[in-house]
Amino acid sequence: MNEGTIQLRDKGVITLPISLRRKYSLRSGDVFSLVELGEGAFALTPQLSRVAALGDKVSEMLQDAGVSVEEVLQTLDEERERYYSEHYAGV
Amino acid sequence: MSDAAKPELFFDSSALFAGVASSTGAGRALLQLGEAWAVAITVSEQVVTETERSLARRAPAALPFFRQTLRASHIRIVNDPAPAEVQAARGFIAHEADVPILVAAMKVKTGFLVTLNRRHFIEDPLVAQRSGLRIGTPGDALAWVRSKLLGAR
């Protein structure tokens, strides 16, 4: 794994080391996804995140249906009981 | 990163659904790390069925996008444990319906069982002790992943 330091410059600009840019064929204009790991740590991945786009779509559709995440989590509890009785009844 | 160093996580249904549907939570960050092959995420058939049934009841139009999110996260789906395996692990967790999830996570020897069900899985320390699993919320799991990834430098 490559190690090194990079400096944050004006307007939040950072420069990736030339060794990494060459190793992964990174070019000016390439788009990255930034994943926050907490405690000031981040991961950069060289692609637009399909997970983020698709997950946001799910979130939008829940809103359109007037359903909160918490309501679906409650439904999950009911489905757990149902699944258990279907597959493990009598265990 | 080599596969040997890659953090392995097992998602319970609650953590999986929240990770997909909530853009700001740690669960979403974990799914994006799965997308980038930085972590390996596993679920069982039960987890998929429960989440899909719940969405089908509440917001069926979201179901195709939910399924695509699972694929994009490179999630591995494993078989449910056999009834005999569940029977053997009865008593590992107080709520019986959770036993198959616990056993599925034990069978794949996951590094971390991720759940939002604090009451059943996390608040009883005997569950982790009996199963031998590290168990916590998506936030706990992300902290563990962070320490693994940074420790791998």
Image: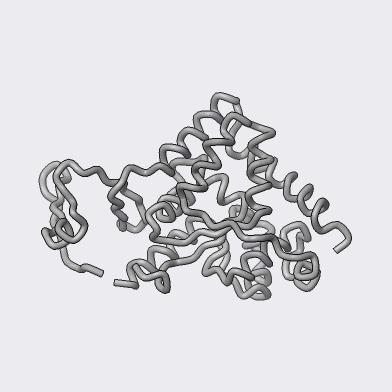
Q: Residue at (62%, 62%) from the top-left corner?
A: B122
For the residue pair B119 and B32, the one nearer the viewer reads as B32
Task: Estimate the x, y position of residue A37 in percent, counting from the top left.
Answer: 37, 56
**Quadrant housing the C terminus of chain B:** bottom left
**What colour-coding does the image apply?**
one colour
Q: Answer left or right for B11 relative to B89.
A: left
Q: Residue at (59%, 53%) from the top-left corner?
A: B116
For the residue pair B88 and B134, the one nearer the viewer reads as B88
Asked whether residue B114 appears in the rendered view, the answer is no
Q: Answer left or right for B27 relative to B77.
A: left
Task: Estimate the x, y position of residue A11 in percent, counting from the top left.
Answer: 14, 41
Residue at the extreme right: A90
Q: Relative to B149, is A47 above or below?
A: above
**The quadrant where residue B30 appears:** bottom left
Asked whether residue B14 appears in the rendered view, the answer is yes
Task: Estimate the x, y position of residue B1 in percent, counting from the top left.
Answer: 34, 67
For the residue pair B140 and B21, the one nearer the viewer reads as B21
Task: Estimate the x, y position of residue B127 in percent, counting from the top left.
Answer: 67, 69
Q: Relative to A4, is A25 above or below?
A: above
Q: Relative to B56, is B48 above or below?
A: below
Q: Residue at (15%, 51%) from the top-left corner?
A: A14
Q: Residue at (57%, 65%) from the top-left corner?
A: B135
